[in-house]
Image (tube, rainbow, N blue to C red):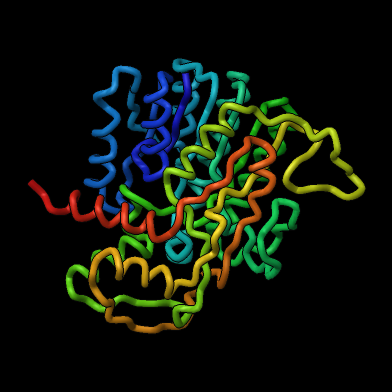
């Protein structure tokens, strides 16, 4: 039995679908909060509910009593923890939501994994943890001690919390640093979704950082394949770990951290260009300065992931954006 938290979320739904398709039994939980359109979350959930191998629990990971009861009743063998309060900019306005979901919620997950001695915990981290780092591409060997948003700080804290449980209780634990995930069923607060909606409505799009921001966009199908491969290979201690020159991505505990990034960092204006081509619309653009908490550039070194599970994302941005547009037009066309 695999427990998937955040199963009505963008990545959670896709991963749960893939697990069910290969014959796994999945218990999914989600609090269906109103951070963005709940109807979209419900629509994602409807893609999972008909499957005989799937069971849904409406539950918040920050609910300690509820999570304790769930772990005792379900007794998962593996946990894929994707539930979180997402969004860099929103963390400036509502930090308490991040404390509850990303810190208290994750503490409940870790304690549940401890009590059930799960075979593997895989959890979502973020490229945001690299914060003020300027050396590109980002490597798991880099220190990540300078977050520039509270969201990033909670994700870094989660990695440290997870290491402590792996060390103390021997729980195989892997954290995945996702790099700007996009694709069908994506989040409405992400740039691709916002741009598509505005352009189809004939509205001007806001282009932050004067369009000079760079992101390592990662297509959802690549993310799912990477997640499942990692889930199938529990973390182990690093036999080559040197405490005199510590590698933050491994350790003497059964703990690993991996980047999952698209492998082709793309200028924001080129990303918009791919969307213009897919839609057949030239966007009206409002050029704006970078927003507080935003990183200027991201680029993932995925060599550690490739060495561990033999996989690196490779879907071209143009192809991924076109697939998103096809989904968007179909989903919002309505009956």
- Give the image quarter of residue 7: top left
Q: Nearer the viewer, residue 142 or 264?
A: 264
Count the numbered circles shown: 0
Given residues 279 and 187, the one toward you in this image is: 279
At x 34%, y 27%, the residue is: 57
**Residue drawn at x 65%, y 55% as measured from the top left:** 301
Q: Residue furthest right?
A: 244
85 horizontally vs 329: left or right = right
**Image-quadrant location for residue 20:** top left
**Residue extending farthest left:** 335
| Residue 96 in view (yes/no) | no
Point out residue 68 in the picture as x, y percentages from the top left corner: 50, 24
* Rendered position, 313 above or below 146: above
Say which residue appears at 35% left-offset and 58% top-offset: 321
- Where residue 96 sits: x, y (%)? 47, 54
Up the image or down, 34 lies above or below 166; here it is below
Q: Residue at x 33, y 26 (%)?
A: 56
Which is more toward the observer, 327 or 140?
A: 327
**Can the viewer see residue 54?**
yes
Q: List x then y, in percent, for residue 101.
A: 48, 45
| Quadrant assignment, res 52 | top left
Relative side of 39 to 249, left or right: left
């Amino acid at each position: 039995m695999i427990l998937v938290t955040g199963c009505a979320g963008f990545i959670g739904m896709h991963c749960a679908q893939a697990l069910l398709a290969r014959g796994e039994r999945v218990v999914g939980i989600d609090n269906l909060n109103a951070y963005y359109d709940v109807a979209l979350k419900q629509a994602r959930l409807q893609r999972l509910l008909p499957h005989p191998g799937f069971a849904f629990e409406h539950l918040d990971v920050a609910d300690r009593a509820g999570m304790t009861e769930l772990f005792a009743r379900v007794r998962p063998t593996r946990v894929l923890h994707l539930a979180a309060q997402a969004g860099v900019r929103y963390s400036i306005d509502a930090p308490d939501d991040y404390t509850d979901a990303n810190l208290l919620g994750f503490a409940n997950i870790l304690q549940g994994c401890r009590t059930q001695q799960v075979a593997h915990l895989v959890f979502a981290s973020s490229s945001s943890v690299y914060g003020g780092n300027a050396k590109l591409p980002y490597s798991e060997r880099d220190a990540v001690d300078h977050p520039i948003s509270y969201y990033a700080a909670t994700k870094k804290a989660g990695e440290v919390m997870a290491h402590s449980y792996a060390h103390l209780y021997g729980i195989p634990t892997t954290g995945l640093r996702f790099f700007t995930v996009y694709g069908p069923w994506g989040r409405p607060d992400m740039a691709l979704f916002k741009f598509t909606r505005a352009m189809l409505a004939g509205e001007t799009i806001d282009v932050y950082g004067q369009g000079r921001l760079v992101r390592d966009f990662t297509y959802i199908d690549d993310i799912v394949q990477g997640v499942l491969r990692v889930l199938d290979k529990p973390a182990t201690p690093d036999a080559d770990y040197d405490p005199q020159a510590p590698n933050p991505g491994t350790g003497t505990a059964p703990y690993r951290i991996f980047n999952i990034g698209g492998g082709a960092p793309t200028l924001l204006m080129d990303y918009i260009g791919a969307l213009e081509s897919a839609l057949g619309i030239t966007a009206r653009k409002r050029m704006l300065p970078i927003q507080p908490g935003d990183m200027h550039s991201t680029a993932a070194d995925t060599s550690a992931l490739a060495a561990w599970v033999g996989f690196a994302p490779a879907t071209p941005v143009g192809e991924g954006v076109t697939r998103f547009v096809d989904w968007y037009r179909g989903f919002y066309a309505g009956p």
